[in-house]
Structures are given as structure tokens and as C-alpha cells.
Image (cartoon, rainbow, N blue to C red):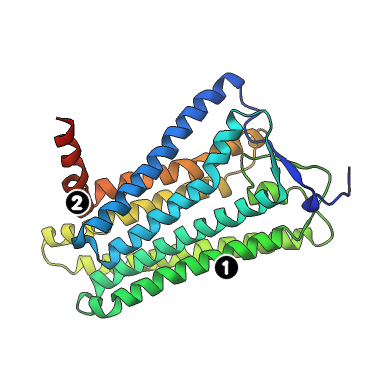
């Protein structure tokens, strides 16, 4: 029904995985389910460890706890629906569900980026201005910074969702993705102002993400300069080791995001987009708790002390 406004319709169809061989879908379901459960368990373990271990009640680990919460919620906003659609023949999604999924995915996604930026600032202050660290990163200031990251994520999510769902959608109600992905949804939009709105949405999203990345890179430019001024090799290694886990997560986060949004469109991109998007929506949250728990020595020791050894004692 060309010309009909699907933004007011009750349902759309998610067409993310039906193009894949049917015998492959249960394998993907099991793989993504295990990664989803591990992501939740890993983040819960990090949050519980930081809560229990009083030595970790510092700004760096406050940001890490907030990051684990945003990552868990981002995963919950997308993955359960994706898992249900992998084994379902009915893949329809209501208007409210579409809007809700887009809002929460953008909210938690941008919050994640803002928190990574705040963690970069924390490392900058700790290494470049150690004598002023307790003043600049007091508990009240840290709590305020975390609140601003969540508020910023909420504003971005609300703004993008309202702009997108005020467009007119016509010609088809099939979304070629496994969730309400903004680029796939914008392909269904029509009208005189559609092109300018699409450019506006992309400009807002890219500006925010590139802005966060620029500030993180700027922080590490000053951090590296400060580390190079340390006379001993052991001192340089010890100082830089406090940044390794954060820097690794930043590289993974932006690398997979670039892989999705900047990859060239080929003839079969419609079928590969869904699989590629899982690297950002499933694989990146899966890697994050692994990186922080293995590369952060204090957190790793605290997990061993509070959980791993007790678990081994109970098992034996």
C-alpha cells in the first residue's frame, strides 16, 4: 500500500535472519544465548565485586560499575528479542516496541560512549594531575559526572527516536534487520524532508560519537606525554598498565561500530548486515567484562578473593 504511513500502523516485520539457512538458526540461537548469559553474568560479577570490595570504592571503579550497568541494559534491550526471532516464525513488532527498542538502544549506547569518555578523563587526571586527583575526582563530582552521562544518553535517545518516528514511512513495513536499527528503518521513510532529516540524524549521532572519541584520544595524548616523562621503565609500565583495560575496550567499541556504519555496501549487504551488527550488539558487550576482569589486576584479584576461591572451596 504505497503512500500509507506505517508510523501509525500497529506492526512491522523484522526480517533479519530469515535469509539464513534454517538449520543454521538453532546454532546461532545457542551461540548468542551463551554470549548473552555470559555478558550478564560477567557484568553482574564486576558490579558485585566493586560493591563488596571497599578498596575498589574509587572513581575509576565507580565508572566501571556504571559502564557494566549500561552494557547489561543495552544487551537486554536488544538480545532477548533477537533470540526469540531466531526460533520464531512470527517476527512482527508493534509501534510501541519499535520506538521503545530504538530509544533504549540509543540511550544505553550513547551512555556507554559517554562513560568511556569519563573514564578517559579519570585516567588523565590520575596520571597528569595526581596531586589534585582527590579534589577534581571527589565522590560527589564522580556521581555528578555519572549522572550527566546517563542524562546525556537519555537526551540523545529521546531526540533521535522522536525525530525518526515523526517521519512518514511508506511502501513497505519490512525492516531488514533483527532489531529496530535506525539505518534500516530510515530506508523505509519517504517524503520531501526525509533526506534532510536522515542527514540530521546521522550528523547528530556521528558528531556525538566522534566527539567522545576525540576527547578520549586527546586524554591519551596527554597521558602518553606524562608517562614518557617518567624516568624508570618500571614506573612507565606500572602507570600505563592502569589504562590498558580502558584503552582496549575503547578500541574494541569503536572498531566494531566503524565496521557496521562505515563498511561499503555490497550486493549482498542486506543479508550480511544482520550478522555484522551482532559484532556490536552481542560480541562487544561479551568482550568487555572479559577485558576488564583479565586486564585489571586489582579487579582480577578482588574477583579471585571474593568469588573464585570461595567457589572452589565449596566445590571441593
Task: Determine if residue 1 is in view.
Answer: yes
Percent position of residue 29, x then y: 51, 29
* Residue at the image position 30 percent from the left and 69 percent from the top: 124
Left or right of 307? Residue 266 is right
> Is 303 above or below relative to 121?
above
* Disc 1 from disc 2: Cα separation: 35 Å
Q: Position of residue 288 (x, y in %)?
A: 37, 48
Relative placement, left or right, of 130 versus 281 is left
Horizontal relation, residue 314 to residue 206: left or right? left
Q: Residue furthest top?
A: 23
Q: Nearer the viewer, residue 222 or 67?
A: 67
How many residues crowd mark 2 within 10 Å: few (<14), some (14–19), many (20+)? some
Residue at 59 percent across and 38 percent down: it is 274
Q: Is residue 276 left or right of residue 136?
A: right
Q: Quadrant of residue 106?
A: bottom right
Q: Secondary structure at mark 1?
A: helix
Q: Which percent across, then down, holds residue 11? A: 75, 44
Q: Secondary structure at mark 2?
A: helix
Task: Quarter of the image for the N terminus: give it.
Answer: top right
Q: Earlier in the sequence, mark 1 or mark 2?
A: 1
Which residue occupies the extreme front position in the image?
A: 314
> Along the line of sight, which residue is nearer the eye, 119 or 157?
157
Q: Nearer the viewer, residue 2 or 61?
A: 61
The residue where tag 2 is placed is 302
Circle 1 is placed at which residue position?
Answer: 155
| Residue 79 sits above or below residue 192 on the image | above
Q: Are marks 1 and 2 in contact (CB under 8 Å)?
A: no
Report crowding for label 1: few under 14, some 14 to 19, many 20 or more residues within 10 A (C-alpha): some
Amino acid at each position: 500500500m504505497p503512500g500509507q504511513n506505517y508510523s501509525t500502523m500497529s506492526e512491522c516485520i523484522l526480517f533479519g535472519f530469515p535469509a539464513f539457512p534454517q538449520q543454521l538458526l538453532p546454532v546461532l540461537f545457542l551461540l548468542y544465548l551463551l554470549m548473552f548469559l555470559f555478558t550478564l553474568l560477567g557484568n553482574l560479577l564486576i558490579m558485585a565485586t566493586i560493591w563488596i570490595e571497599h578498596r575498589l570504592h574509587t572513581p575509576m571503579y565507580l565508572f566501571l560499575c556504571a559502564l557494566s550497568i549500561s552494557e547489561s541494559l543495552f544487551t537486554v534491550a536488544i538480545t532477548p528479542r533477537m533470540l526469540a526471532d531466531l526460533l520464531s516464525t512470527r517476527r512482527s513488532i508493534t509501534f510501541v516496541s519499535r520506538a521503545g527498542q530504538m530509544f533504549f538502544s540509543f540511550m544505553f549506547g550513547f551512555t556507554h560512549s559517554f562513560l568511556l569518555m569519563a573514564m578517559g578523563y579519570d585516567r588523565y587526571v590520575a596520571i597528569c594531575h595526581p596531586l589534585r586527583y582527590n579534589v577534581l575526582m571527589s565522590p560527589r563530582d564522580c556521581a555528578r559526572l555519572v549522572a550527566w552521562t546517563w542524562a546525556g544518553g537519555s537526551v540523545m535517545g529521546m531526540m533521535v527516536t522522536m525525530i525518526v518516528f515523526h517521519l512518514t514511512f511508506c511502501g513497505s513495513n519490512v525492516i531488514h534487520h533483527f532489531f529496530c536499527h535506525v539505518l534500516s528503518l530510515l530506508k523505509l521513510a519517504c517524503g520531501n524532508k526525509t533526506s534532510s532529516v536522515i542527514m540530521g540524524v546521522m550528523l547528530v549521532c556521528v558528531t556525538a560519537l566522534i566527539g567522545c572519541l576525540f576527547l578520549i584520544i586527546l586524554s591519551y595524548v596527554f597521558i602518553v606525554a606524562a608517562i614518557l616523562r617518567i624516568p624508570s621503565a618500571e614506573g612507565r609500565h606500572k602507570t600505563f598498565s592502569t589504562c590498558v583495560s580502558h584503552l582496549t575496550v575503547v578500541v574494541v567499541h569503536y572498531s566494531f561500530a566503524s565496521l557496521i556504519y562505515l563498511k561499503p555496501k555490497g550486493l549482498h549487504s542486506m543479508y550480511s548486515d544482520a550478522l555484522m551488527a551482532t559484532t556490536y550488539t552481542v560480541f562487544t558487550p561479551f568482550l568487555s567484562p572479559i577485558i576488564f576482569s583479565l586486564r585489571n589486576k586489582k579487579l582480577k584479584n578482588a574477583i579471585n578473593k571474593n568469588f573464585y576461591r570461595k567457589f572452589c572451596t565449596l566445590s571441593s
